[in-house]
Image (tube, helix red, strand yellow):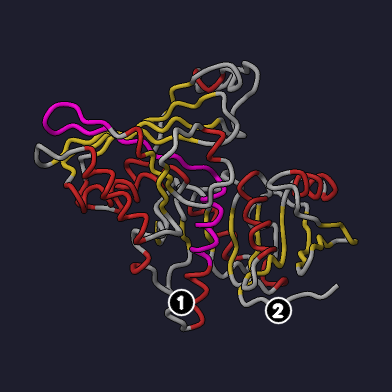
Amino acid sequence: MAETNRGLRIGLMGLGQIGRQIYRQAAASEDIEIGAVADIGRPEGLQYLLETGGDKTFRCRIEGNFLRGEGSCSRMLQLVAPGDVPWDAFGVDCVIDATGRYRRREHAERQLAAGAGRLIMATLPVDAPDRLLVPGINEAAASADDRMISAGSPTTNALALLLDALDAAVGVEYATMTTIHAYTSDQSLQDYSQDDQRRSRSAAQNIIPNANASAACVEQLLPRFAGRLSGCALNVPVQRGSLLDLNCVLRKGGVEVAAINDAMRAAAAARPELIAVAEDPIVSSDVIGCRHSLLFDLIATQRAGARMAKTLGWYETLGHAWRVLDVARLYGALSSGDPQ
């Protein structure tokens, strides 16, 4: 089996849904190699999930301590916590933490001390990282000195791109968002007692109101909106495909629905790898497999009164997996001195 010589070598911690999506996209790329994978699961079980998810065309096999696919070879480690993996022994340039569990600076510091070089979280942090970076918003702020980076969350990426585009085109004074979010692996499928009483209810049977930190994080990414955003989540019994409901108070009256939609068409044309528009009456299952951070729903745009506008945007975890790899590539280029 021929193996490619890729430019960026990554360590991956966590082969949950987003971790597996990251692994598949990296394995199919020409410029990224996953040098080592750490997960608490049994290697045979992880191989099974890698092959049965996605488009079901991905193939890999276990050979000793390695996971091999066409053009890829990754050392597999059945380890649990940050600091357990000696990343420097595997020659990785950076580590992607896709577990969703280790979001504190102390966790990142353990990874760095174990030779990670740079840590990129595929979710929002609890403690402030060196950089919260969302492609399409603040790539120019990235520094080669950044060591702990958050690539945000799927909701944060979608919200930042939508709000930034609308504000640039028609002017947004205030906004509130609700993410109608597919259930996640940290929710129980049956009622199960835990501290958060709402989250103790079955994810498969209920619409569950939930807190969401995306609005606060977007205020950091777009400081002009400091104190002018709010948001929450509704976790719904859908496995994949989420929806962002953004309600805006515009700076001036008289902005027509057509102007808002034209602004989003222009944003999609300017950043086609990040934003797309949907002309058809799509539903959540139609979003599965979408590689964009935001799929704007043109049919759904509404006006209310002189200055209120409602917009909808779809997204799913696959798009976020692509963005996490984009962030890794950006920092890889910075480390090599290539400004891309």
Rendered view: 71 above or below 56: below
Nearer the observer, disc 1 or disc 2? Answer: 2
Could you tell me which residue is drawn at 56 percent across and 19 percent down?
200
> On the rendered structure, is 272 left or right of 30?
left
Q: Nearer the viewer, residue 253 or 218?
A: 253
Is residue 310 one of those drawn in magenta?
A: yes
Quarter occupied by the N terminus? bottom right
x, y percent for residue 338: 46, 82
Rendered view: 128 above or below 242: below
Could you tell me which residue is drawn at 22 percent across and 34 percent down?
309
Is residue 181 one of those drawn in magenta?
A: no
Tag 2: amino acid: Asn
Could you tell me which residue is drawn at 54 percent across and 17 percent down?
206
> On the rendered structure, is 335 left or right of 9?
left
Instruction: Determine crowd level at label 1: few under 14, some 14-19, many 20+ residues with C-alpha closer than 10 A.
Output: some
Tag 1: amino acid: Leu
Q: What residue is pinned by disc 1?
A: 334
x, y percent for residue 248: 22, 36
Gap between marks 1 and 2, in whole Å? 20 Å
User: Mark 1 or mark 2, which has the lower sequence index?
Assistant: 2
The range drawn in magenta is: 302-328
Q: Does dot 2 land on a helix, a strand or a loop?
A: loop
Could you tell me which residue is drawn at 77 percent across and 57 percent down?
77
Instruction: Determine crowd level at label 2: few under 14, some 14-19, many 20+ residues with C-alpha closer than 10 A.
Output: few
Q: Nearer the viewer, residue 300 or 167?
A: 300
Quarter occupied by the C terminus? bottom left
x, y percent for residue 156: 40, 46
Q: What residue is pinned by disc 2?
A: 5
x, y percent for residue 183: 56, 30
> On the rendered structure, is 6 left or right of 277?
right
